[in-house]
């Protein structure tokens, strides 16, 4: 075999590989003839091998008078003399080799790699699928280009490994059922195998969507090791077996495109980054009180009057491009049109159906009309509101094929409804705010279920309130999913205990916009120079909110350590579909999109795919730090401008930046 700095290349195929570098030693006389230098990923740090005795200065020659005595001594010792080159026996066994890492994020559920051997990819490496599928064809074309071109070097490259003699030239995908549509319960499991001394690797999956997840894993296995010995090509673990499947079927990102607009290219960019992290749901919060940026054919005036500008609109062509692109990476797109609250942007086209539109949101002498600036809610007592809402929902379902349709129904403001005289008369005659919301739900939810054949997703408010809610009879469990955002695990428990399926987006853990301070203007609370008094709510001082209602900033550790099944029985846990991190865009747009999402969304991606605990049941956040540092490094190389986790010194010195050893 050929050995260099921490790397050996198998030369004699008849010799079996060993699992430890210490078992691959060869006689020093043979090594002296065959050693050569192979880079291990840090070319600037290469050192040439030298004879260990070369560092010892030569001893002075003995005096001539001592030669006769030396000759006699040699004669006496000759029968028992050992070869001079033999080193003394070691006083203790050599230290074990460091654990060899498999650089894949999110961490696969099962990995077997008995021997630390890598195989180079050929320059003509290719991927073939049997049978094929339109989404799979796109993914194959993408990953062939990507794998051939990417030359990732880990921050701390693996050492002490063997380079296999047989390069990998082909990756074969085997799919059991290529016709399974992308949907809520799709099987994303796969197995990946790179047999030792084989020119081909294999991915087997039940569906094309599982095969796409396997392709991403294979792409992350490849890295730029081996140097000239690998022909300048990336290398992948040889003899590795991976069996992988997600813990949760719903793993997503919510992006709000109403407070601030995001161009199509940035949405596609985000979907691609989601696929890198095996996230599979893009929850598109398209409209809100501030803007209505989507052009719908039946009601085009909503976008005409409700968008920020003609250049800040999504056409039907844009939507289909986004949906098709997402499907090619196994990502579902779930649209949300929030109503009856958060609909001030509808007032430009249909002022008669919106209450309290275009009014100051927080009048001094009366209750606030909205949770934040921009007021307006659909009027449940106006029949035209339902005709417009149904037109919107019908057009939306034609553009978005996903079985889920999000109807919002959060943060309904009672003062905004009471601003309307018809509503005030209804209330004065014994009606309630809950009845108003139930009127709206009963007029729109059955339409979505029976006419559009959709499962309806609502925010938790529709059932849990706290101010306005409807009863369970208005929300059949078979066709309703509720998304949590308040009170962490407590509200998740309440929803699943009531028998509803849940998507978890707890603000205390999963809201990525939190902790950036307040954004409303003319706020005198910032003009405070003295230290805040004891017992008063902190605002500016350390530990205060700084104006962010959901402060503090949610670090990746906060995201990673969240157990979305906390406190649930097994039966209740089965009703949790998964989770979504959310980026509400009051203070975000395309300029900061990557940094707001990544790598924190990647932290959620791993917990939703393979959990945040090791085989021992302990949370693996310490282990995850090193791996996520390296994954962030790779994402940046892939064009995702993810924020750093730590100073670069930390991942270069693993464990040295931990709080405890």
Image (cartoon, grey):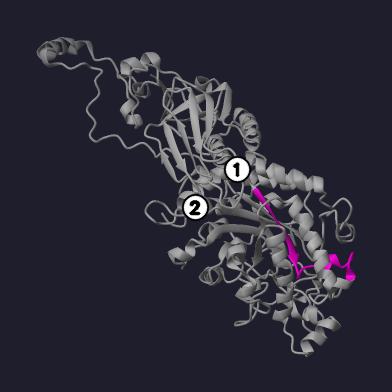
- Residue 364: in sight, yes or no? no
Question: Which contiguous range is marked in magenta?
Answer: 332-351
Task: Indicate whether 280 appears above or below 142.
Answer: below
What residue is shown at x 77% (from left), y 57% (from top)?
Answer: 394
Residue 247: mark: 2
Q: CA distance from mark 2 to mark 1?
A: 17 Å
- Residue 230: in sight, yes or no? yes
**Which quadrant holds the C terminus?**
bottom left
Q: Quadrant of residue 334?
A: bottom right
For the residue pair 254 and 116, the one nearer the viewer reads as 254
**Which quadrant holds the N terminus?**
top left
What residue is shown at x 36% (from left), y 30% (from top)?
Answer: 21
For the residue pair 129 and 65, the one nearer the viewer reads as 129
x then y, percent, for residue 73: 13, 14
In the rendered view, does 357 fall on the left or right side of 140? Answer: right
In the rendered view, does 479 fall on the left or right side of 323? Answer: left
In the rendered view, does 346 fall on the left or right side of 217? Answer: right
x then y, percent, for residue 131: 57, 31
Q: Which residue is mark 1?
A: 276
């Amino acid at each position: 075999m050929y050995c260099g700095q921490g790397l050996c290349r198998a030369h004699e195929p008849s010799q079996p590989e060993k699992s430890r570098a210490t078992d691959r030693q060869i006689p020093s006389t043979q090594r002296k003839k065959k050693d050569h230098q192979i880079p291990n990923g840090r070319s600037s740090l290469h050192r040439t091998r030298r004879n260990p005795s070369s560092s010892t200065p030569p001893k002075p020659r003995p005096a001539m008078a001592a030669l006769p005595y030396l000759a006699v001594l040699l004669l006496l010792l000759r029968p028992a003399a050992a070869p001079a080159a033999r080193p003394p026996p070691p006083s203790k066994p050599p230290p074990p080799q460091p654990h060899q890492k498999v650089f894949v994020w999110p961490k696969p559920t099962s990995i077997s790699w008995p021997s630390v051997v890598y195989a180079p990819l050929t320059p003509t490496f290719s991927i073939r699928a049997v049978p094929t599928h339109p989404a799979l064809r796109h993914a194959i074309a993408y990953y062939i280009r990507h794998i051939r071109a990417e030359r990732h070097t880990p921050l701390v490259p693996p050492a002490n490994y063997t380079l296999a003699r047989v390069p990998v030239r082909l990756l074969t995908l085997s799919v059991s059922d290529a016709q399974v549509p992308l949907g809520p319960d799709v099987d994303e499991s796969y197995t990946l195998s790179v047999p030792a001394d084989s020119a081909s690797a294999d991915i087997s999956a039940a569906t094309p969507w599982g095969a796409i997840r396997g392709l991403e894993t294979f792409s992350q296995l490849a890295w730029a090791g081996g140097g000239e010995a690998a022909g300048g090509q990336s290398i992948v673990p040889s003899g590795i077996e991976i069996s992988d499947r997600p813990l949760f079927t719903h793993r997503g990102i919510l992006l709000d495109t109403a407070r601030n607009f995001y161009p199509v290219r940035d949405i596609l960019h985000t979907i691609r980054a989601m696929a890198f992290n095996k996230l599979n749901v893009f929850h598109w919060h398209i409209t809100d009180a501030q803007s209505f940026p989507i052009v719908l054919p039946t009601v085009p005036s909503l976008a005409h009057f409700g968008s920020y500008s003609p250049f800040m609109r999504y056409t039907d062509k844009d939507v289909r491009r986004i949906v098709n692109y997402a499907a090619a990476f196994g990502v579902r797109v779930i649209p949300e049109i929030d109503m009856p609250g958060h609909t001030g942007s509808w007032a430009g086209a249909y002022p008669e159906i919106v209450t309290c539109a275009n009014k100051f949101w927080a009048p001094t002498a009366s209750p606030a009309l909205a949770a934040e600036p921009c007021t307006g809610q659909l009027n449940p007592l106006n029949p035209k509101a339902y005709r417009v809402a149904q037109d919107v929902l019908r057009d939306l379902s034609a553009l978005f094929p996903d079985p889920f349709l999000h109807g919002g129904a959060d943060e309904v403001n009672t003062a905004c409804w009471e601003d309307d005289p018809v509503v005030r008369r209804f209330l004065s005659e014994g009606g309630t705010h809950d009845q108003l919301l139930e009127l709206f739900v009963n007029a729109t939810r059955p339409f979505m279920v029976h006419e559009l054949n959709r499962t309806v997703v609502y925010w938790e408010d529709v059932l849990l309130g706290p101010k306005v809610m409807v009863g369970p009879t208005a929300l059949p469990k078979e066709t309703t999913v509720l998304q949590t955002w308040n009170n962490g695990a407590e509200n998740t428990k309440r929803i699943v205990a009531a028998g509803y399926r849940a998507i978890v987006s707890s603000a205390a853990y999963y809201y990525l916009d939190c902790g950036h301070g307040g954004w409303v203007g003319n706020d005198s609370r910032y003009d405070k120079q003295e230290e805040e008094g004891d017992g008063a709510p902190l605002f500016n001082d350390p530990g205060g909110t700084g104006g962010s209602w959901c402060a503090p900033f949610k670090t990746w550790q906060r995201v990673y350590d969240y157990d979305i099944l906390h406190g649930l029985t097994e039966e209740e846990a089965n009703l949790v579909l998964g989770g979504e991190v959310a980026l509400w865009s009051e203070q975000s747009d395309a300029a900061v999109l990557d940094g707001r999402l990544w790598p924190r969304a990647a932290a959620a991606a791993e917990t939703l795919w393979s959990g945040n605990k090791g085989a021992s049941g302990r949370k693996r956040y310490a282990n995850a730090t090193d791996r996520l540092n390296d994954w962030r490094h790779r994402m940046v190389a892939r064009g995702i401008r993810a924020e750093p986790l730590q100073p670069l010194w930390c991942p270069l010195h693993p464990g040295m930046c931990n709080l405890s050893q």
